Image (cartoon, rainbow, N blue to C red):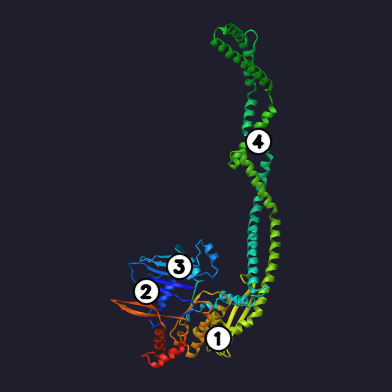
Amino acid sequence: MLKEIHIQNYALIDQLDLEMSRGLTMITGETGAGKSIILGALGLVTGKRADLSAIRDTSTKCVVEVHFDISRLGLKDFFVKEDLDYQDITIIRREILPSGKSRSFVNDTPVTLNVVSTIGSQLIDIHSQHQTLQLATDQFQMETMNAFVNEQTKKSDRSGNVVLQNYQNQLKEYKALTKQLTSLRDNQAELSRELDYNTFLLNELEEAQIDGLNQEELEQENEQLSNVEQITEALSMLEHKISEEDNGILDELREVNTQLKSIKGFSPKYQELNERLTSVLVELEDMSTEAESLKDQVELDPERLEFINTKLAQLDNLYRKHQLDSVEDLIKLRDDLADKVLSSQNIDGKIKNMESQIASKTKELDQLAKELHDLRANHKTELEEQIAETVRSLGMKDAQFEVRLLPTETFNNNGKDQVEFAFTANRGTPLLALDKAASGGELSRLMLSIKALLSRCKQMPTIIFDEIDTGVSGSIAEKMAIIMKQMATAMQVITITHLPQIASAGDDHLIVRKRNQEDRTVSVIERLSESARVEEIAQMLSGGSISDAARENARILLQ
């Protein structure tokens, strides 16, 4: 519901702050007074293209801000998707800067024009005699059919809404499966081409037996085996120099230590020297023992040396080939290749499994699509009769309306049906699709009839009728007013009209007037009191000076 409109510096409007009412609001005024300016401003907050020429004062910005009560429209998911702050009273603002640049905001958050257009289309439906293209779209006709079926079956366990929601959930899964299948088939050819090469690389890495390899230890062992003689000679010399009898280091130091023992009692310092030398003797004895042990362990092993050299050369070759530098990287590469080879080998099975799932899902979708078709077929006659009855009450007594359910080969978002409305306003002429069937005035009354039906079937956005009563007689205007009044019990309806029979039906009445202010003309909008409303309706009835009879007729219309 549209609650408040704020317009600044737009066309003939300097400043406008207007609160809107529930129910049916009428807007009247002389031709050229500025009624269309209101629609233009509202068009800005529903995503229409901004026009710099609409700025009254080009030195300052134009601002249109509209407050909506969206609490009953189920738009929370949209706000979450667009990362917007949801509020029951949502504010949409559009600014046109003097440079011509346009900015849009939802609850003070900057948004793209596409977001404004998407949300705006769900908040306001502006309809005029020249804007009936929506009526002929497949989407609108299907939405009308679905809304009517949902209303007629809402108390059933298998209501139209339940079946459609189930179908759409299954369709989402079906599309995901077909997308995966397409991807698998695309990958199949590529994987097949790569399989032989990847298998070769994998075998090469597996044959290298790289698990548990420590390259640093291999290199160290290689150094030892490559220098056996030098190592043996050094260890032998160490052992010999330390432990050689008579001339060895140990014998000489033991003799020295004996002398130190004899004097250690003379001074703590001598005792310390004795202890330190004793420690050195122990360390040398240990070194001699270890050197002997290490020397015994060193042996020439040409086969082991050859194995290590081969393994290190193999690693070096693999590093260069794969542009890697560690055994861990080679192991990861080997495991990745194993996964690819396994995927290549298993892809045929995956494709068959996916095809089986899709076949099962197709069967489910066919059953649900048939159920949807049957629901529509069962209720289409009633839809035809209700719309035809309303259209005939609007002066087209020979009008005929038909709902055609056309089968489609593929699944669409609503099953396997395409809904087509056919219409004729004259007896003896064939029913034709709406884009070929009627004049603007006839389609306008058909649109009113359909929108009236929809208002009983689902929650509708604010609808604005812009002079759809053009060329309509007084008696038909009264019927139109009744329909709008009925619609307004379930939704907000705003009607711009020149006919007193329609204007008098409103719960609220606004008038647009032009005024001269100094050297310029401005448009203003005022809410009419009961007495002022009588005068306005009387003026519309008389078309000139207001007579007492016109005032009395106005009072009768307003009762």
The amino acid pointed to by label 2 is Ala
The amino acid pointed to by label 1 is Val
The amino acid pointed to by label 3 is Ile
Residue named by callout 4: 213
Question: Where 480 falls versus 233 (above or below)?
Answer: below
Q: From the viewer's perspective, is 320 left or right of 371?
A: left
Question: Where's residue 270, x and y in %?
Answer: 55, 10
Of 254 and 273, nearer the camera is 273
Q: Earlier in the sequence, mark 1 or mark 2?
A: 2
The nearer-to-camera label among 1 and 3 is 3
Q: Which mark is residue 11?
A: 2
Image point (65%, 68%), residue name: 166
Q: Earlier in the sequence, mark 2 or mark 3?
A: 2
Question: Where's residue 115, x and y in %?
Answer: 49, 66
Question: Where's residue 347, x and y in %?
Answer: 68, 55
SS under mark 3: strand
Badge 3 crowding class, 10 Å Cα cut-off, few under 14, some 14 to 19, many 20 or more, is many
Badge 1 crowding class, 10 Å Cα cut-off, few under 14, some 14 to 19, many 20 or more, is many
SS under mark 4: loop
Of 36 and 533, nearer the camera is 533
Q: Earlier in the sequence, mark 1 or mark 4?
A: 4
Q: Earlier in the sequence, mark 1 or mark 3?
A: 3
Residue named by callout 1: 391
Question: Where's residue 307, x and y in %?
Answer: 68, 32
The answer to whether any part of residue 443 appears in the image is no
The amino acid pointed to by label 4 is Leu
CA distance separating discs 1 and 4: 88 Å
Q: Quadrant of residue 18?
A: bottom left
Q: Quadrant of residue 259?
A: top right
Residue named by callout 3: 92
Image point (57%, 11%), residue name: 271
SS under mark 1: helix
